[in-house]
Image: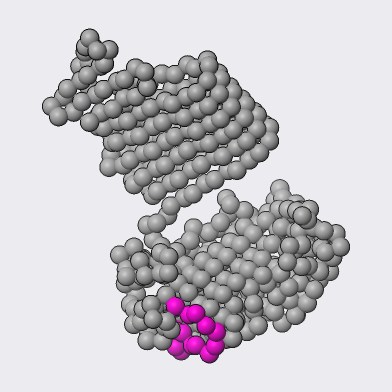
Amino acid sequence: MPTILTFTIKPSGGDYTSMTTCRAANAKNLITADEQHIYEFYTFTGGLNDNDAFVGYTDDATRNIILKVADESLWDGIDPKSGFYFKNTTSSAVIRPISGIQNMELDGICADGSSSTQGVISISNGGDFKSVNNLGFIDVARDNFPSGFSGTVDNTLLINPGDDGGVLSTAVNKLTVVNAGNRGIVTTTGSTITNSFFYGSTGVDFSNQGGSGHDYNATGDGTATGVNSLINRSDADFENFVGLDYRTSATSALASSGSVDFIGYSLAGSGGISIILDEQGPSFTESFNTTLSVNISANISEAGPSFSESVNVDVSSLTIQASIAEQGASFSEGVSATVTPSLSINASISENGPSFIESINTDLEVNISSSISELGPSFSESINLNLTKDVLASITEFGPSFNESINANIPIKITLNPKNLIRVKRKSNTVIIKRKSNIIRVK
């Protein structure tokens, strides 16, 4: 496995202030050096005015160059200029690798091409790409994916391409092209286009000149190829066409017409966030902090001693699922949620090993299912609930030395009967606490 070297590119405080200076300092034969180079970009106010041919590099499929945007600087999925983006003002394409480079990858790269007569991606120097994902280009001149480009394309938005959206001989999935200056897409031998939406092109939206397996696409005209494709679509299929939000609308037929889910580069309202940490070894500190109005699924999976983790979520609608799964010694975890009515929360901690400290704390007016499941000695757990509706809270453990508590603030009267069960009747609602299994149920 190659040695991975990451270089940060920031206006200040990073390793370099431009892509060009980073390349000049680090270009080499990556195959001989057995290295992979990652250029990690952070937001530049007004965009980064830069371009490079990556002279001095040689790569292969795994010892290659990856240009990626740091998580904190990713675009919002609507406006390509909302995070890091290139703003090239020269007469050269932004990324134009030399022939020694055939496997460059782009992840999250955005560009505003309104100040240049050239494109962003070029293969005119003989170089090529392995894959691109989550790109957002606006007002970029020429073919945004030029003829001969052979990298796979996923989850990408092209707004106002100067010529064709792309002339492609590769696999394309979830590409949206809006208002192309010529054709939305041109397929050639080797291409397979799926789950993509082409709309408003000056020429045809879908020019099928080769390839196979084109299906589950949509076009504003009648040119989409494939028995499952949709034709003659309108701007109502976008979330807000006038407002320049080109995500697929959740109320559109495209929202459920893809090969797996939807057609288009992104689905409005889906917004689900899946955060996963997989770790092995000692001394971890992790946290999830999220403020959102959509679904969140957050998971931590670990193996080893000395962990400290937390999942903190503040949501205003829909569903939250948060879980921590661990194996090893000395864990400290927390799942905290602040939610408003009409929500549901499922929070769980699952662990295997000694010395755990966990907590699930919620304050809400809706259904909650909270559980802690552990195997090993020396546990300390608590579930604290303040609610006015149904609740299911449980602790399941195996091993010695447990300290658990379930605290519920329920606006009803609790009495004890001779069968060692606590029963509470509130019209049709019943609370049952079985002391052996530590379970509270409200029906």
Q: Is residue 126 left or right of residue 341?
A: right
**Quarter of the image where one finds residue 267:** bottom left
Residue 81 or 411: which is nearer the viewer?
411
- Image label count: 0
Residue 335 at x, y = what percent?
46, 33
Residue lying farthest top? 418
State the residue at coordinates (34%, 47%): 318
Magenta region: 197-215
Is residue 202 depicted above or below 5 in this figure?
Answer: below
Residue 106 or 356: which is nearer the viewer?
356
Residue 352 at x, y = what percent?
56, 30
One can see residue 97 in this view? no
Residue 413 at x, y = what percent?
20, 16
Is residue 256 depicted above or below 274 in this figure?
Answer: below
Q: Is residue 299 magenta?
A: no
Residue lying farthest left? 427
State the residue at coordinates (64%, 79%): 149
Quadrant of the image for the N terminus?
bottom right
Is residue 333 depicted above or below 295 in this figure?
Answer: above
Residue 443 at x, y = what percent?
22, 31
**Quarter of the image where one finds residue 321:** top left
**Quarter of the image where one finds residue 423:** top left
